[in-house]
Amino acid sequence: MTEQWRKDKEYLSYIEDLLETTEVQRLADFVQHYHSTRLDHSISVSYNSYKLAKKWNGDVRATARAGLLHDLFYYDWRTTKFDEGSHAYMHPRIAAENAAKLTELSELEKDIIIKHMWGATLALPRYKESYIVTMVDKYCAVKEALSPAMGQIKVRWRHLVLRKQSVV
């Protein structure tokens, strides 16, 4: 992820108070998708969702904040199991509970956090901002999961191109 978000004063004004909390900073201790941390992932989802909400006249503040808090949980999702339901069902509810301890959540922010796993769950989003975060979350997860493989493909491609150039 680029560090472009650090230079966006409007975006920072919406999330700075949350970023400064120990609870959000703890997300850096958890690997999310292979080489990214949960904090990196959450910032990526938050910032990219914020940009789309801005473009589409959405509530940019709620989108940025809920995007940052959508995965506010502290366990390894690959190994932790729940009796009440799957990780896809449980972690948005845990994240919403944890987020509500940090800040007052609007109905929109609650919907964004709880419904961001739509597709893997049946909880249909109510607002366009919820759809934005849901889709950006999927995009970021796939991008993060594929980044190690893409790096290897780029290296192999360069070797093939260089080998071909040396033959000619």
Image: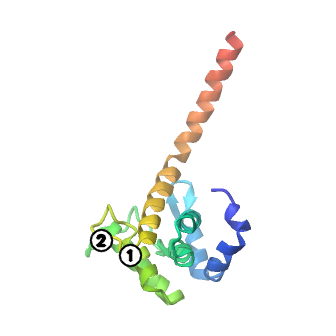
Estimate the x, y position of residue 48 in percent, counting from the top left.
Answer: 56, 62
Would you say residue 22 is visible in this rendering? yes
Q: Looking at the rendered structure, which numbered label has been put on residue 114?
A: 1
User: Given the image, on which type of amino acid does mark 1 rest?
Assistant: Ile
Would you say residue 81 is visible in this rendering? no
Name the element at disc 2.
loop
Mark 1 vs 2, N-terminal side: 1
Q: Quadrant of the C terminus?
A: top right
Instruction: Residue under label 2, please give it.
Output: 123
Residue 113 shown left or right of residue 37 in the figure: left
Who's the residue at 71% across and 14% down the image?
166
Estimate the x, y position of residue 66 in percent, counting from the top left.
Answer: 50, 76
Name the element at disc 1.
helix
> Is the residue 161 above or below the residue 110 in the image?
above
Estimate the x, y position of residue 161 in percent, counting from the top left.
Answer: 64, 22
Residue 99 shown left or right of residue 17 in the figure: left
